Amino acid sequence: MMAAVVSLGGTVGKKAACEALAVARATFYRHANRKSSRGNEKCRPAPPLALSQQERQAVLDVAHEKRFWDASPYQIYATLLDEGRYIASIRTFYRVLAANQEVCERRKQVVRPRYQKKVEKTSNYPYWG
């Protein structure tokens, strides 16, 4: 639709083209500006206090310890503080685990087979009770 406004706008003007095609001019200009600014985006620098890859791996290693297999990040954090160790904040534990798709239920779950109702065989003759 915007391509039609652009092509028609060259001959009759943008205002008339937008009115003829029932497109708001603000929408047209927003669309045009969005396309031109996409190529000019700068890469965002890493925050200065961001965890290094080794620190992220340390968080994952602690979360993967056998004693923490069924513990939430809050419980891991509290246990480590009781032991006098500080790896990362609770929110950082959640963030690192979410980046590795491990925020779901961390305990081992039993997978039960699907129950299928038994179908009784009926005779070919209707019941005339």
Image (cartoon, rainbow, N blue to C red):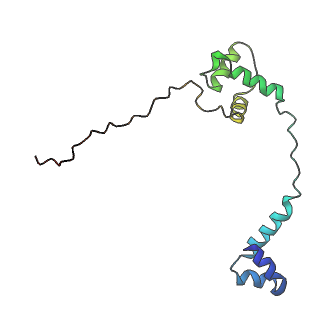
Q: Is residue 79 left or right of residue 45?
A: left
In this view, which residue lies farthest toward the front? 124
Residue 80's place in the image compared with 114, above or below, is above
User: Which of 4/45 is in front?
Assistant: 4
Q: Residue furthest top?
A: 83
Q: Position of residue 89 (x, y in %)?
A: 73, 27
Name the quarter where the N terminus is drawn: bottom right
> Is 103 placed left or right of 88 in the picture?
left
Q: Residue 81 location in percent, x, y?
A: 70, 17
- Judging depth in this view, the residue of 117 and 104 nearest the camera is 117
Q: Position of residue 43 (x, y in %)?
A: 87, 48
83 above or below 77? above
- Seen at 70% across and 32% down, the residue is 91
Percent coordinates x, y for residue 58 in the rendering: 77, 22
Question: Residue 121 occupies which quadrant of the picture?
Answer: top left
At a point 61% along the width and 22% down the height, the residue shown is 71
Q: Nearer the viewer, residue 41 or 126?
A: 126
Q: Quadrant of residue 2?
A: bottom right
